[in-house]
Image (tube, rainbow, N blue to C red):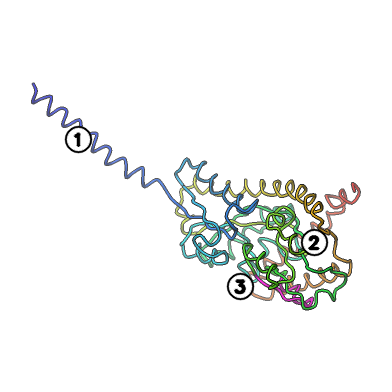
Amino acid sequence: MKRRNFLKNTIGIGTVAAATTLSSPALSKGKIKWKMITTWPKNFPGLGTGAQRIADSITAMSEGQLTVKLFAAGELVPAFECFDAVRQDTAQMSHGMSYYWINKNKSTPFFAAVPGGLTAQEHNAWIHYGGGQDLWDELYADFNVKGFLGGNTGVQMGGWFNKEINSLKDFKGLKMRMPGLGAEVINRMGATAVSLPGGEIMPALQSGAIDATEWVGPWNDLAFGFYKVANNYYGPGFHEPGSHTECIVNKTAFDELPINLKKIVEHACVSENNRMLSEFTYANNISQKKLIDFGVNIKNFPDEVYQEMFKISDEVVAETANEGDINKRIYNSWLKFKKEARERAPYAEQGYMTRRG
């Protein structure tokens, strides 16, 4: 009897152990861990925290099946190396701006913002319904990455200057932080564009390495403390009328995901794309009041400056079409949508805002 009980218990224990041995690897195989890198300083308002929300949403919605750990700029790779890191699968996901990768292809800025371009609402429509996403996928496929819209800052400011801008001649010899195609515009206006990640802008202003900078808008600019160095704040900017952040994923890693996880990644990005714009709209209103209280001079550029900015912008953006077939198709698609949006504008938001006052 004792022997039978012993054998029974031994078999039972062995069965449980075997089941545990079989089930644990099966469960562990279902767990996927991704690294997400960003071009933003750690916990930076809106941009950095928005990226964190995407990572957290994917982890939560998948119930831990796909866990995303975020690394701020410089924690895993420098800010401007994020694209290559995702391409090479050093990280599986990145959050930044597509115009940072203009050295890869002149048309990458179209999926963030181009000078004289689309507003946030217009850009959303072009990407989702005007053929923009298909062109984006085609452009990025050569790099083994896929892009999703991952947030929007709304219309950005024109920048901070250590002197007043009263005419076109005030741009001559100016050293200004400016990314993307906007850099070429101000170069043609007589300034010198400087490319810097966000975390390096303030030291450059303080040291005199640059005379002016654009960044985002009142909320983010207040957080960096630019008002302590430069007191002349101009807006709106010509260069980023509706700046979309992007989430790029390694295409091989993404394609290996089951369909439910692919949809979760996509949904997390779409959700943050909507939320971030609302957050920036609210926070910019509050932050602009604070900047005024600090004595900042907020003003528009003179009309002649705006006219020149937009004239050169049209030229610079059109020139991207000469880079190749995909560039031409991106530009033509974008331009067609822009023309249609411009025809509609007097009877939509533009017309309403003009009359509302």
Q: How many labels does the image show?
A: 3
Name the element at disc 2. Answer: strand
Q: Which residue is drawn at 77% across and 70% down?
A: 313
> Residue 352 location, x and y as percent?
87, 48
Q: How packed is label 1: few (under 14 Cα within 10 Å), some, or many (20 or more)?
A: few
Name the element at disc 1. Answer: helix
Label 1 sits on what residue type? Gly
Left or right position of 255 against 188: left
Q: Name the residue under label 1.
A: 14
- Closest to the observer, 216 or 270: 216
| Mark whose residue sits in front, 3 or 2 | 2
Quarter residue 312 falls in: bottom right
Label 3 sits on what residue type? Asn
Left or right position of 305 against 12: right
- Quick check: is 246 in the magenta stretch? no
Query: Rounded to the nearest whole Å, what is the CA distance between mark 3 and mark 1?
Result: 61 Å
- The magenta region covers 183-195
- Closest to the observer, 232 or 345: 232
Q: Residue at x 56, y 49 (%)?
A: 52
Q: Name the residue under label 2.
A: 233
Q: Residue at x 48, y 55 (%)?
A: 35
Q: How packed is label 2: few (under 14 Cα within 10 Å), some, or many (20 or more)?
A: many
Name the element at disc 3. Answer: loop
Q: Name the residue under label 3.
A: 103
Query: Rounded to the nearest whole Å, what is the CA distance between mark 3 and mark 2?
Result: 29 Å
Q: Quadrant of the N terminus?
A: top left
Q: How packed is label 3: few (under 14 Cα within 10 Å), some, or many (20 or more)?
A: few
